[in-house]
Image (spheres, coloured by chain):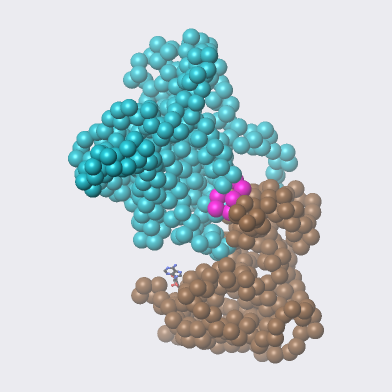
Chain colours: A cyan, B brown
């Protein structure tokens, strides 16, 4: 049996094909529109815009690597975003009014208001965790295919957010005066003398830390290994002693948690909550994961690929617009990149699938596995 | 039960049978896959499990190894009753019971070293895997127990690139490494060439020589007849008879099995 003795660079370095594509695209855009891509402002914009997308895509990398899908995360951006915005904006006054406290009580002081604003963070995260946990139970214990289960919960939680918010949006006016804003989405180098440095957003650092931790969990932790074995084959995973149901519940819970962090970053960065926030993220996030090289059949997943996938998806818009095309072309281009990537991975990385495909094409059903 | 001189006795408590099933039933909805199964596996015997497709052989060993619980009945391991509410594959592993399935033992897209250790990884107390150590031991198993010295297979090879015989070798080597007292083989020779089948049969004999027990599921009667001490025949979920290979030739056995299937 012939097998390659020395794996090429493409196989040895994680996500090498997509990193190459990223560099080529970047060089192309730099050549076509140097006034945008050779100046730092486009990149600081990426750093404030990408964290929610990257966080969700990283969670999806685990889910898709485990052979499942989650369509509920846009609704977590909606619902957790609502929970956060409501407590952050209305919480301080509501508490004082609700309990009938006097204006002199400590609870009416600015310090107490700040404390209440901070509780918005754990509340929003808890909401995401609970939603994710419920998704996991529906998939693992009740046995609903994840595509259907999470489609249903997406409807439900968007509906819930609309009911509870009464369809209102919340503008978080004056949010940047709160320490919550400074810590989560502030500009830590605002006092720098270099203009673009002042614009570096702190959520980019938080996101980087989370991504690194998630990389270690996927590649070095028992949990990540279990996710990939489950994605490879549920039957094998059971036989080697993995508690498949429990790990799936954990996977969806993790997804809910990461989507909730994304919701907080997005809501605070925009200083606004609106009813259908997150809806534009569904395709972008799934595309980031699959362009990055995580297998649509499960069993193989790459966090680094996902991050570069997200960058490529994000780069398309300023790239095309700066090159003189209208914004209408953006999604067409994204769709094209997405499809090319899927076909590429199918043919390069999955030789068994490839031969199965040709077998089907030829119509010889007895051959192939 | 003859005493085995080869048994590495140190640290192993005395017991009469490694596994015993009492009145085990298994339903899949309305389908009854196992009916009133009573079965005893001694500590150093090779038991051949034979029967038609769908007779319930695979189901029987899944129930025995904690993959799925029986609908009712009792399971004893080393003469001690198992609490079925928390019996699991992991617990079966802890009780030194290992299974090699024809096609479900290895994950295709994962490297060999992960396949060796998944389910019982070497980790620190936070659950992070000691990759170096796992690869080192996997390499030893590969070169030692399995003998893949020169074939270009390394611990980083993915399973998808291996031949059927190589896969069985890996799965069997893994079972040996974990020093099982009972090794269960579910049709390990399916789709293997003659030379590879020989290797598997030699391995089955080695299980016996090292003082362990083995349950060997096989459709090829000549193969089981050759190595088994006792043959258990399963028909539509029922244990219909037990036969000593020395009392019946392969041809008589074949005719006997056909006669069972024609009964209703
Ligand atoms: N997970 C399951 N769900 C429903 N029915 C099942 C399941 N597993 C097995 N069965 C049924 O139980 C019966 C016994 O199946 P089993 O796989 O144990 O047979 P077997 O003796 O191993 O057959 P083979 O020789 O073909 O491997 C069959 O009727 C099968 O359809
Ligand atoms: Mg079977």
For this view, does A105 lie left or right of residue A130? Answer: left
**Stretch of the chain drawn in magenta:** A219-224
- In the rendered image, residue A63 lying in the magenta stretch gets the answer no
Q: Position of residue A339 (x, y in %)?
A: 44, 32
Residue at 62%, 61% in the rendered image:
B120
Rendered view: B77 above or below A105: below
Q: Position of residue B81 (x, y in %)?
A: 55, 83
Residue at 74%, 78% in the rendered image:
B11
In which quarter of the view is residue B264 placed? bottom left
Q: Position of residue A55 (x, y in %)?
A: 46, 38
Q: Position of residue A300 (x, y in %)?
A: 55, 45
Q: Which residue is nearer to you in this view: B264 or B210?
A: B210
Q: Which residue is nearer to you in this view: B147 or B223?
A: B147
For this view, does A273 lie left or right of residue A240? Answer: left
The furthest residue to the front: A104
In which quarter of the view is residue B21 placed? bottom right
Q: Is residue B255 visible?
A: no
């Amino acid at each position: 049996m012939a097998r390659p003795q020395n794996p090429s660079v493409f196989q040895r370095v994680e996500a090498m094909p997509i990193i190459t594509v990223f560099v080529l695209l970047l060089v192309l855009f730099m050549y076509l529109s140097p006034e945008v891509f050779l100046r730092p402002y486009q990149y600081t914009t990426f750093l404030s815009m990408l964290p929610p997308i990257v966080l969700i895509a990283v969670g999806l990398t685990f889910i898709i690597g485990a052979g499942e899908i989650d369509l509920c995360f846009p609704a977590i951006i909606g619902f957790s975003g609502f929970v956060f915005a409501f407590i952050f904006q209305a919480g301080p006054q509501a508490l004082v009014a609700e309990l009938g406290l006097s204006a002199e009580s400590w609870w009416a002081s600015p310090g107490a208001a700040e404390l209440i604003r901070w509780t918005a963070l754990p509340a929003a995260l808890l909401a995401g965790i609970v939603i994710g946990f419920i998704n996991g139970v529906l998939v693992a214990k009740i046995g609903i295919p994840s595509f259907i289960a999470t489609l249903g919960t997406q409807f439900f939680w968007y509906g819930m957010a609309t009911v509870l918010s009464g369809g209102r949006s919340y503008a978080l006016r004056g949010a940047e005066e709160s320490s919550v804003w400074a810590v989560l989405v502030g500009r830590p180098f605002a006092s720098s003398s270099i203009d673009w440095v002042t614009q570096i957003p702190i959520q980019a650092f938080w996101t980087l830390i989370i991504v690194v931790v998630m990389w270690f969990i996927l590649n070095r932790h028992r949990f990540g290994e279990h996710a990939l074995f489950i994605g490879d084959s549920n039957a094998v995973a059971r036989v080697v002693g993995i508690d498949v149901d429990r790990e799936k519940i954990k996977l969806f819970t993790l997804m809910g948690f990461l989507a909730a962090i994304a919701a907080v970053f997005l809501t605070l960065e925009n200083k606004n909550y609106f009813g259908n926030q997150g809806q534009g993220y569904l395709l972008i996030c799934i595309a980031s994961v699959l362009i990055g090289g995580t297998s649509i059949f499960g069993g193989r997943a790459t966090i680094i690929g996902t991050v570069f996938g997200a960058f490529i998806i994000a780069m398309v818009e300023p790239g095309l617009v700066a090159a003189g095309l209208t914004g209408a072309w953006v999604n067409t281009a994204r769709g094209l990149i997405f499809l090319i990537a899927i076909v590429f991975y199918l043919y390069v990385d999955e030789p068994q699938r490839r031969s199965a495909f040709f077998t089907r094409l030829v119509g010889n059903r007895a051959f192939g596995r | 039960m003859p005493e085995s001189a080869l048994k590495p006795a140190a640290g192993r408590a005395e017991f009469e049978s490694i596994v015993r099933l009492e009145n085990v039933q298994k339903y899949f909805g309305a389908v009854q896959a196992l009916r009133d199964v009573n079965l005893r596996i001694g500590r150093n015997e090779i038991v051949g499990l034979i029967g038609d497709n769908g007779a319930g052989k695979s189901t029987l060993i899944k129930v025995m190894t904690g993959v799925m619980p029986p609908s009712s009945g009792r399971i004893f391991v080393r003469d001690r009753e198992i609490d079925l509410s928390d019996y699991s594959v992991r617990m079966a592993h802890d009780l030194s019971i290992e299974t090699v399935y024809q096609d479900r033992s290895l994950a295709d897209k994962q490297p060999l070293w992960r396949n060796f250790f998944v389910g019982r990884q070497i980790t620190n107390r936070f659950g992070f895997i000691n990759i170096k150590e796992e690869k080192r031991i996997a390499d030893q198993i590969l070169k030692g127990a399995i003998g893949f010295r020169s074939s270009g297979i390394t611990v980083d090879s993915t399973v998808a690139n291996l031949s059927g015989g190589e896969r069985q070798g890996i799965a069997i080597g893994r079972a040996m490494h974990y020093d099982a007292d009972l090794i269960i083989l579910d049709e390990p020779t399916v789709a293997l060439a003659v030379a590879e089948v020989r290797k598997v049969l030699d391995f089955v004999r080695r299980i016996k020589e090292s003082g362990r027990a083995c349950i060997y599921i096989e459709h090829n009667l000549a193969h089981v007849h050759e190595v088994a001490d006792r043959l258990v025949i399963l028909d539509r979920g029922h244990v219909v008879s037990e036969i000593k290979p020395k009392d019946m030739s392969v041809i008589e056995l074949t005719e006997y099995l056909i006669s069972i299937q024609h009964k209703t």
